[in-house]
Amino acid sequence: MKAEHKQGWLFVSPWVIGFVLLTAGPMVYSLYLSFTASSLLSPPQWVGLENYRRMFGDPIFYRSLGNTAYYAVLGVPLGMVLSLGLALLLDAPVRGLGFFRTLFFLPSVTNTVALSILWLWLLNPEFGLINLALARFGLEGPLWLQDETWAKPALVLMSLWTVGGQMIICLAALQGVPPELKEAAAIDGAGPVRRFFAVTLPLISPALLFNLIMGLVGALQVFTQAFVMTGGVQPGSEGGPNQSTLFIVLYIYKKAFQEYDMGYASALAWALFLIITVCTWIAWRVSKSRVHYEGGSA
Amino acid sequence: MNGLSHGSAPARVLRIGTLYLVLLGLGALFATPVAWMLSSSLHTLPDVFAQPYRWLPAVLQWENYVRAVTILPVPLFLWNTIVITVPVMAATALSSALVAYGFARFRFPGRDLLFSLCLATMMLPGQVTMIPLYILFARLGWVDTYLPLIVPALFGSPFYIFLLRQFFLTIPKDSEEAALIDGASRLRIWWSIILPQARPALATVLIFTFIGTWNDFFGPLLYLNSPEKATLTLGLNLMKTQVLGSGVVEWNVLMAGSLLVLLPNVVLFFLAQQHFIKGISMGASK
């Protein structure tokens, strides 16, 4: 082997070793586990497709899928629109916008457990700020997390408060749009709305696609909020009223680490992996024709 | 440029005025939860539940903060968090920089394939590996120790490898080539020529690693069973469970505890906002 080859391999070897030991190996083992009945204490027993068969007949699995889909379908588009809206406001050539950028960005760079506890209090049906504010307008607020219908919208509402990262990505993309293009469109008689849809939107579409995919991947893996906010005092009670906030990752966690049903949990994890891959692929394929990349159309 | 610079002067003033009004409204919406948190954390317990709610406490109840750090051993949680975070930061930065240097400066067969693989693992959902990893660490007897939280950092982290590689590619090769002719080893060059020049990128990596590790919930939840080994984030959840389980929920104490856990994030954010913006935009550009 040439000296340069050897040295190159040596430098990248920490990642290669880590990849084999902590990623590839565990992936293979997890696939194997999904075909076994397995707890921590006893060695895995091969059961073939039994876990997958069980999954397709498991109403709680479908419930967790439905909850996750609901959260993603409601939360991801709202988050994208809000983050783009905020970025558009901040892209104006006006003084003092740095303050607002900081304000909108800050909640996204913090501790999910602390934020969950804060929102638990904000959403408190009797004394929480949200229902106090609604009462001001003569509205009786819902029970939020204690109400099967309102628990997921409550979590979506909270997620909208942390769109700062997506906003920064939109803002960076907006600031990369050459002003000449917009001016040229203005000279051609295009109004602001027309300029936005004909010039700005195509140019920032890669950033929007990134936000869509990351938002989707994040929403499909939502866990901490549901665990902290909808768990009672008893361990194992997480998941909200009538399992309305039992998201798929929470279900996997409970199966694996509260019930030690490792084989079934592995099958669930692989189902989630497949779902995430397919969703990402669809989002990418569908948007590909609409996304504009600099230096050639995709 | 929303076309604010166009049009007549009065129309421009009107537009800017509207923009500020909208921003103030939205800003108030974003700031209110934090203001309410601060307000609640300084109220007596009866005042927390008083209706109508008064935003300003009659007397600032700093005791709530004392209670928040004594109801559970928060100083111990703080120490535990530091004991995990500092090694993870050092290990992540060094191992990622080593690997990134390998990808940036050497030609070897399979390099591009490996690099694509490295980028691909960024998108891999952790659920497909967490069960085998748990079993592995349990076999090694590492459950309820900090090792499962620290040791993986020694193998580099794909996003930081990517970020550092991109940065290394922008560093001119002249001084490295001169050092090679002088007989310096590649490792020595990496340490004394590349790393000093990569300080801004390393700072971004250290800040992101700090935020990620300091606030990690899932890792400690999985691996730390003994309450006295808990991190701040895990401890805060323990505090929540304990306080919610008592007769009258001390929301003022919970808000004080949550604020204390948030504080290092907020301070770091204000000190290094540009790093956050750079790191996040970098993530989108891959």
Image (cartoon, rainbow, N blue to C red):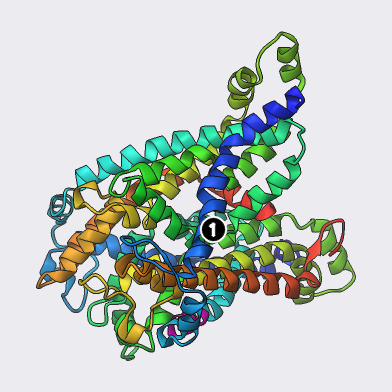
Q: Depth check: B221 or B16 in front? A: B221
Q: Is residue A77 magenta?
A: no
Question: Which residues lie in the magenta part?
Answer: A63-70
Residue A241, percent from left and from top? 31, 84
Q: Is residue A64 magenta?
A: yes
Residue A22, percent from left and from top? 51, 49
Name the residue: 58% across, 74% down: A275
Name the residue: 70% across, 59% down: A174
Left or right: residue A231 compared with residue A294 = left
Q: Is residue A34 above or below residue B183?
A: below
Residue type marked 1? Met
Residue A31, percent from left and from top? 53, 64
Q: What residue is disc 1 on?
A: A27
Quarter containing the C terminus of chain A: bottom right
Left or right: residue B189 compared with residue A177 = left
Decide: few, some or many residues near mark 1? Use Cα within 10 Å; few <14, some 14-19, many ≥20: many
Q: Quadrant of residue B150?
A: top left
